[in-house]
Amino acid sequence: MTVAKYVIGNWKMNGDYALVMQMIAALRSMGPLDNVTTVICPPFTLLHSFAELLGMGHIHLGAQDCGTEISGARTGDISAAMLIEQNCRYAIVGHSERRRYQMESNEVVAAKAANAQAAGLMPVICVGENLAEREEEQAEIIVEEQVTAVLKKLKNAAVIFAYEPVWAIGTGQVASHSDIAGMHDVIRARAAKHDFKDVAVLYGGSVKPENAGGILALGGVDGVLLGGASIDPDAFIAIAKTAHHLP
Ligand code: PEP
């Protein structure tokens, strides 16, 4: 049986209206792809333009973050309800750049994921060890802690994790297939322990058109989370087509 794969693009703090138009044109010519769920997460400021121009069912919108609170005195934050109003269906939480530069703890990430879920967004929860943690053979422990902190706060419903080893993000260094498969099993086992059954696990970290096929073909990989490749329309579409053509 062929299982649908996610191809999710995180534009980070990149892109402008011109790139939105370029991407929309490319996505229109791509058309819908069976067995692929395609999601774009542009900066907040481009969500509205994207939604206005998108007008088609085969691409979904996601946000790169979501607030810990429902509303109120949180200057600069964006609530889950605001994201729903901007036609988002997904929200990335716990990206390693936010954990690092905004000092987001596992508890903060868990609060964001719970808020996203409560509002009707699908949380895409990023987890992953840094290089020092890997070298100290702590990778599994770190990832298990990150996963557990979130699952404790979530209602038992569908959820997406993205395993993104920090040392693989934007470096051109991809985790080995056996490391990816092994950590995906760890995440799934932890989810099963908490009785979560509808769990998708994606890989992220220097995925490009050249290496996407091998990663997407791995048994426990339900899709990919793309950074750099997501702001290159040709690369993004090439990866979505690779997912579509998997046997
Ligand atoms: C990311 O930041 O989530 C990511 C996977 O980035 P890149 O694909 O550029 O490594």
Image (tube, rainbow, N blue to C red):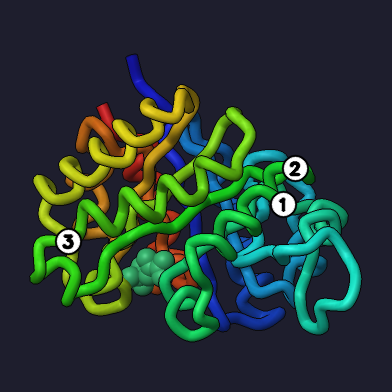
SS category of the residue bearing label 1: helix
Left or right of residue 161: residue 132: left
Closest to the camera, between mark 3 and mark 2, is 3
Disc 1 target residue: 115
Mark identifier at residue 138: 3
Mark identifier at residue 118: 2
User: Is any part of residue 227 visible from this angle?
Assistant: no
Q: Where is residue 203 in the image (x, y as percent from the top left)?
A: 32, 51
- For label 3, being within 8 Å of ligand 1 is answered no
Q: Position of residue 72 (x, y in %)?
A: 90, 70
The mark that comes first in sequence, 3 or 2, is 2
Residue 176 falls in image quadrant: bottom left
Q: Distance between the residues labelled 3 and 1?
A: 29 Å
**Viewport quadrant of the N terminus:** top left
- Relative to 217, say whether 52 is above or below: below
Q: What residue type is labelled 1?
A: Asn
